[in-house]
Image (cartoon, rainbow, N blue to C red):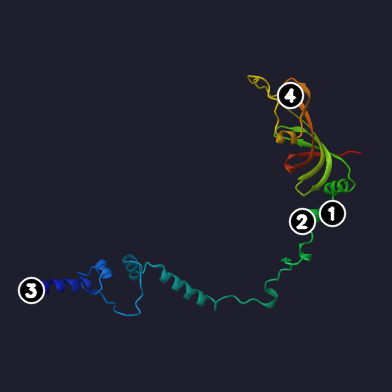
Amino acid sequence: MADDENSSTSEESLDLTSEKFKPMKALYSSKAKLSSVKAPIYDNVSKFEAVMSGLSGEKKKKQKTIEAGQGEHSRQRFLPSQAPVSSTRRTGGRAGDTEGRNVLSKMQKTLGPLGVLHECMQSRTRVKVYTRNAYGIRGHVEAYVAAFDRHWNLALEDCFEVWTRKVKRKAPALGPPSVTRTEEEDSVPKVVVTKIERKRETLERHVPQLLLRGEQVAIIVKIN
């Protein structure tokens, strides 16, 4: 009798229509059978309950699909003259389409002040570029213009730079002065202090090449 009661209780726990149905036991039991071969498979019981209660997103997606299908018939129909205009913009892909898209070709089409700067570059005329910092004019650079862009970023050659800064006062190092120099220090342009006035000093150096950002450019003067 006890075996019959246990078997009946086990069957009831696997029966979907029974009040004693245990979902977790049904998931792991080999005796549980699906009511239909085409029944959908869900990840867990919570997903099944959400679908049955209508809270799942699957029904919402189906509803949106149905509404979209119904909306195609109610769209406004435009006349041929009201159709979208096709774009004439080049999409690239050929060598001719990329013409005028690099800095070197754009420099030739510049007008106004940038055109004068292009003339100085073509004629190899030196210019004096006044640079600025956060507080005012920092100094100037005399050089040849190698390249530039519309943001006034400058690539300069044979540069002679003069600028001012606050005098740096450092405590002398203990021991004998060091005479050894590395190769990197020899390759760095030498900075010469030409003048000291109170707390400011004037420095100058010669640099073979220099890249100057446009936000640091204040004035550019042509040197005759």
The residue located at (72%, 35%) in the rendering is 183
- Which amino acid lies under the numbered mark 1 shown in the image of this protein? Gln
Circle 4 — which element?
strand
Q: Is residue 23 above or below residue 111?
A: below
Q: Is residue 22 above or below residue 166?
A: below
- Residue found at the far front of this picture: 180
The earlier-in-sequence mark between 3 and 2 is: 3
The earlier-in-sequence mark between 1 and 3 is: 3
Circle 2 — which element?
loop
Looking at the picture, how far across and down is residue 171, in whole percent? Answer: 64, 20
Q: Residues within 10 Å of mark 4 (few under 14, many from 20)?
A: few
- Residue beneath label 4, please? 200
- Residue found at the far bottom of this picture: 37
The earlier-in-sequence mark between 1 and 4 is: 1
Res 172 → quadrant = top right
- Which amino acid lies under the numbered mark 2 shown in the image of this protein? Asn
- Residue beneath label 1, please? 108
State yes or no: discs 3 and 2 in contact (Cβ < 8 Å).
Answer: no
Looking at the picture, how far across and down is residue 95, in whole percent? Answer: 77, 65
- Residue beneath label 3, please? 1
- Which amino acid lies under the numbered mark 4 shown in the image of this protein? Arg
Circle 1 — which element?
loop
Looking at the picture, how far across and down is residue 142, in whole percent? Answer: 83, 37
- Residue beneath label 2, please? 102
State yes or no: discs 1 and 4 in contact (Cβ < 8 Å).
Answer: no
The earlier-in-sequence mark between 2 and 1 is: 2
Q: Is residue 206 above or below residue 195?
A: below
- Which amino acid lies under the numbered mark 3 shown in the image of this protein? Met
Circle 3 — which element?
loop
Q: Nearer the viewer, residue 179 or 63?
A: 179
Give the spatial CA distance, label 4 vs label 2. 42 Å
